[in-house]
Amino acid sequence: MLTTGKAVKVTLYLSDGARHHGVPIYTSILDFLFHGGIAGATVVKGLAGFGARHRLHSAHILEISDHLPIKVEFIETREKVDAILPELERRAGSGLIEVQEISIIVPPRQ
């Protein structure tokens, strides 16, 4: 359980067309985080973006792109992040992983 104080925010930048063993990478990562006891995670799908290859991808009304940006974010203790980072790197494939030291405030439960 997270408590007020130091924590780590991890953001993975992926493509929604990328797969890991035939499953969308973001689904594989979310499942891994869920079963790994991570406090919580969010997946956000972008409307447009480009990556390292500088190919612009966007969602248009008349077409559906499977290369739109996907961002997976979670906040956890440094120890848990260090423990799962090698597996996240393996699953992310050609994606990008950002790790930030942060401070969090967890309000008391009412």
Image (cartoon, grey):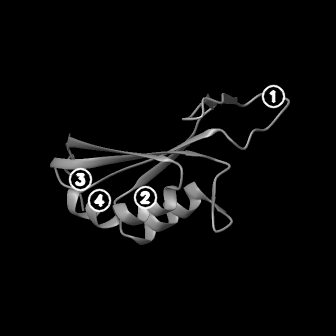
First along the sequence among labels 1 and 4: 1
- Cα distance in 3D space between marks 1 and 4: 38 Å
Question: Disc 1 designates what residue?
Answer: 61
Identified by mark 4, the residue type is Val
In which quadrant of the rendered view does residue 82 lie? bottom left
Q: Which circle, 2 or 3, is nearer the viewer?
A: 2
Identified by mark 3, the residue type is Arg
Q: How many marks?
A: 4
**Residue 89 - label:** 2
Q: Secondary structure at mark 4?
A: helix
Horizontal side, residue 43 vs residue 73: left or right: right
**Residue 81 - label:** 4
Which residue is pictured at 23% across the width and 57% down the height?
77
**Mark 3 and mark 2 in contact (Cβ < 8 Å)?**
no
First along the sequence among labels 1 and 2: 1
Q: Which circle, 3 or 4, is nearer the viewer?
A: 4
- Cα distance in 3D space between marks 2 and 3: 34 Å
Q: Position of residue 29 (x, y in %)?
A: 50, 60
- Cα distance in 3D space between marks 3 and 4: 25 Å
Which residue is pictured at 65% across the width and 38% down the height?
68
Horizontal side, residue 4 vs residue 21: left or right: left
First along the sequence among labels 2 and 3: 2
Residue 38 versus residue 57: which sits nearer the camera? 57
